[in-house]
Amino acid sequence: MFGRWHRGGSPIGRGHASGNVLTSLGDGERAVITQVAGGQLLEARLQNMGLRPGKLVTKLATMPGGGPVTVECDGFRVALGRGIASRVQVKRIAETTRSDEL
């Protein structure tokens, strides 16, 4: 039964991060990637997309019905499946004001 959902609605098995992960961010919220809770292949795959610890990401949207999570990093938009997005741990950052962006 590893990797399946049980009655409580939380994942069973290894590799699932808890706490502040990409899927827990609200649309438009910004955060810094702190860690990837996965194997070397997942880490390499995300690094090839520019998603690595220390990078600032903005969550753009989450598709309904279990669809992908879209994030922006360094001007590029990337869609990640929810399983992968739930393994990317982040640290939320304070919102910037409009005058800071100008």
Image (cartoon, rainbow, N blue to C red):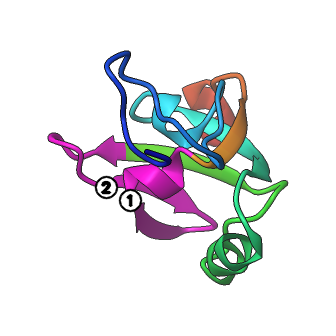
In which quadrant is the C terminus drawn? top right
Whether residue 25 is visible: no
Query: Is 40 above or below relative to 11?
Result: below
Q: CA–CA distance between discs 1 and 2? A: 4 Å
Q: Which residues are magenta?
A: 61-86
Queried whether the magenta region covers residue 67, the answer comes back as yes
Question: Image quadrant of residue 89?
Answer: top right
Mark 1 secondary-structure assignment: loop
58 w.r.t. 75: above or below = above
Left or right of residue 64, residue 85 in this image:
right
Residue at 62% across / 50% down in the picture?
57
Q: Quadrant of the N terminus?
A: top left
Task: Say above or below: 48 vs 102.
Answer: below
In the orientation shown, which residue stands out farthest toward the front?
A: 1
Amino acid on which disc 1 is placed: Gly
Q: Nearer the viewer, residue 96 or 11?
A: 11
**Is 2 or 17 nearer to us in this picture?**
2
Q: Which residue is depicted at the point 65% across and 49% down?
A: 15
Residue type at mark 2 is Pro
Q: Which residue is mark 1?
A: 81
Mark number displayed over residue 68: 2
Against 71, residue 28 (above or below) is above
- The reply to whether dot 1 and dot 2 touch (C-beta < 8 Å) is yes
Label 1 or label 2, whichever comes before in sequence order: 2
